[in-house]
Amino acid sequence: MSHAFWLAIGLLLIAEGIGPFLAPDGWRRAIAQVSQQSNNILRRIGGCFVVAGLIILYFYLR
């Protein structure tokens, strides 16, 4: 379990770091646009990410 946890954290950090590393100006603009969205929209986006992640895990661990 510990190995899988650290693997997941490492992959998350890589995925999160690609945007600011490759295109810092575009990343900054995207974050500014996201921060102006309503809480409802942010919850929907977050929910979609959670569902997509669960689907990926389901098919990977099946």
Image (tube, rainbow, N blue to C red):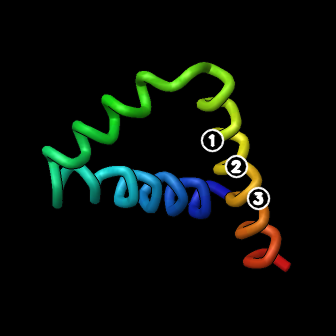
Residue lying at 15% horizontally and 47% vertically, measured from the top left: 24
Q: Quadrant of the C terminus?
A: bottom right
Count of numbered marks: 3
- In the picture, measured across the screen, residue 20 lies left or right of residue 15, that is left
Question: Label 2 near label 1: C-beta < 8 Å?
Answer: yes
Q: Quadrant of the N terminus?
A: bottom right
The amino acid type found where label 3 is placed reads Leu
Real-space CA distance between mark 1 and mark 2, rounded to the nearest whole angstrom: 5 Å
**Percent position of residue 50, x then y:** 70, 48
Query: What's the distance in space between the residues labelled 1 and 3, CA to CA?
Result: 14 Å
Horizontal and vertical percent for residue 48?
70, 49
Q: Disc 1 residue type?
A: Ile
| Disc ID at residue 34 | none
For marks 1 and 3 on the same chain, the one whose residue lies earlier in the sequence: 1
Position above or below: 10 against 27: below
Residue named by callout 3: 54
Q: Position of residue 44 (x, y in %)?
A: 70, 37
State the CA–CA distance, disc 3 to disc 2. Answer: 10 Å
Q: Which residue is mark 1?
A: 45
**Which label sits on residue 48?**
2
Q: Residues within 10 Å of mark 3 (few under 14, many from 20)?
A: few
First-in-chain label (3 vs 2): 2
Specify the quadrant of the image occupied by residue 61: bottom right
**Circle 1 Cα neighbour tier, 10 Å, few/some/many (<14 / 14–19 / ≥20):** few
Q: Residue at x 73, y 77 (%)?
A: 60
Give the image quarter of residue 29.
top left
| Residue 3 image-quadrant placement | bottom right
Secondary structure beneath label 2: helix
Q: Amino acid at mark 2?
A: Cys
Identify whether 36 is placed above or below 51.
above
Q: Is residue 36 left or right of residue 30?
A: right
Q: Secondary structure at mark 3?
A: helix
